[in-house]
Amino acid sequence: MIRPRKAGVVASFEFLSTVRRVGYLVATFGMPVFVILYGGFIAGLGAFVNKRVEARASRPRVVAVVDEGGAIGLVSRIEEPAVELPPEVREAIERARSMNPRAPALAVGRIVFTPAAAEDEAKEALADGRIDAYYVLGSDYLQTGAVRFVQRETGFGDRVQAGSAFASLVRRRLLEGKVEEEILERVKQPVVRTERLMMDESGAIKPYSRLGKAAATLVPIVFTIMLFVSLMISAGYLVQGTALEKENRVVEVLLASADPDEILLGKLVGLGSAALLQVAVWLGLLILAGVLFAGALAAAGVSLPWAAAGLAVPYFLATYALLGSLMLGTGSLGGTMRESQQWSMLWTMLVALPVMFLGIMIPDPNGPVARALTWFPFSSGITVLLRLALEPEGVRWWEIAGSLALLAASTWFGIRFGARLFRIGLLLGGSRPRLREILRQARLG
């Protein structure tokens, strides 16, 4: 008969000793702070680099053109953008600036092309610093398409990137006066804006964004890894604590005041509460980030996995109880920390199955692999939450109810089996039990 007071004392001790650990505090609060600081560093670095680029782009680069055969007929200075941005990049920049008008524009620089009568004249101007580079179109350019590009030897950051602008200039000059202005503009820039749409499984057409798709995939991965890491940390504390207590003979003192079932229950509840606190902190920060950046996420086509977040607690608690009880039971059979971890490795590998199959489940979250792992108790929690985060419309209600029921039943059997093993491990002390003895004493019937 389990005495709640005894189990409560063990649970309180385990909870307080866990939340005071430096490793726990770093994982719970340090990891989110690190992510925030890292994001701020990347944003700051991007702003710094953009300012440097803007400063450099404020002065147009001057490039002379020596047209020996008169192929393009350049007679005056013409200014071109240094880089022709792809439509998707332009759209992403426009969306970012619409959400944050204070965001700096992407500096792409300008190129000023000026005619030169001969290559000697261009060489002299380059040597004097009056131009930054020059092109030479030979007299046979129209037949060969070959050009020469000359610039001063400088650092990589100071090199003239004029290829895109020069190609645009040549196309326009070759066609100018030969085709209509509208056709000329389309030859120069065939695609100005692309509206990307996607048909979902129901046949509905909705907007599609590659950047949004990448972000929408990254969020579930982070969410899944977060839950897996929390499970491994909390279950690892269970095994470490029990192994240390056996090595230091503390378990003999515990057995003098509480029976093995009370110790097992207390450890599960105490460390489970610490793990739940950790998940609550991470989920709270996730929700806060979702609220603060709701506009930016919506514009990018990213939706936070609210359904997965809502079911995270029951799945997490059931998986933790199943994993923790079995790891405690098998870990208690080891005489040292290393042996305890080796005994518990099997359960860790089973829970890690969804992480191992991420490469298969992410592109096909409702495929045969994902559905099979949904009905395997050790992997069902993380698998269902990942599927809900990726494509919630593909997860049927009976899959959630059935996997939860199966997980709950497995947890009940796991706790009973783990309790028997835990009792054997504690009562046998440092001796190593034989397999026949373990099976005989751990029989559930």
Image (cartoon, grey):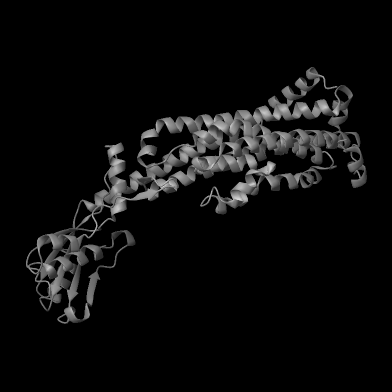
Vertical position of residue 287 compared to residue 40: above or below:
above
Screen quadrant of the C terminus = top right
In the image: residue 34, left or right of residue 248: left
Task: Name the residue at 63% across, 39% down.
Answer: 381
Screen quadrant of the N terminus = top right
In the rendered picture of this protein, how many numbered marks are placed on residues? 0
* Residue 236, position as x, y percentages in the image: 71, 39
* Residue closest to the eye, 337 or 197: 197
Task: Name the residue at 59% across, 52% down.
Answer: 368
In the image: residue 376, left or right of residue 327: left
* Residue 373, position as x, y percentages in the image: 64, 47
* Quadrant in the rendering for residue 39: top left
Vertical position of residue 379 compared to residue 74: above or below:
above
| Residue occupying the far top of the picture | 5
* Residue 338, position as x, y percentages in the image: 79, 46
* Residue 315, position as x, y percentages in the image: 63, 34
Q: Can residue 47 be spotted in the picture?
A: yes
Vertical position of residue 275 compared to residue 2: above or below:
below
Q: Can residue 22 be spotted in the picture?
A: no
* Residue closest to the eye, 413 or 329: 413
* Residue closest to the eye, 398 or 229: 398
Vertical position of residue 83 compared to residue 420: above or below:
below
In the image: residue 101, left or right of residue 425: left
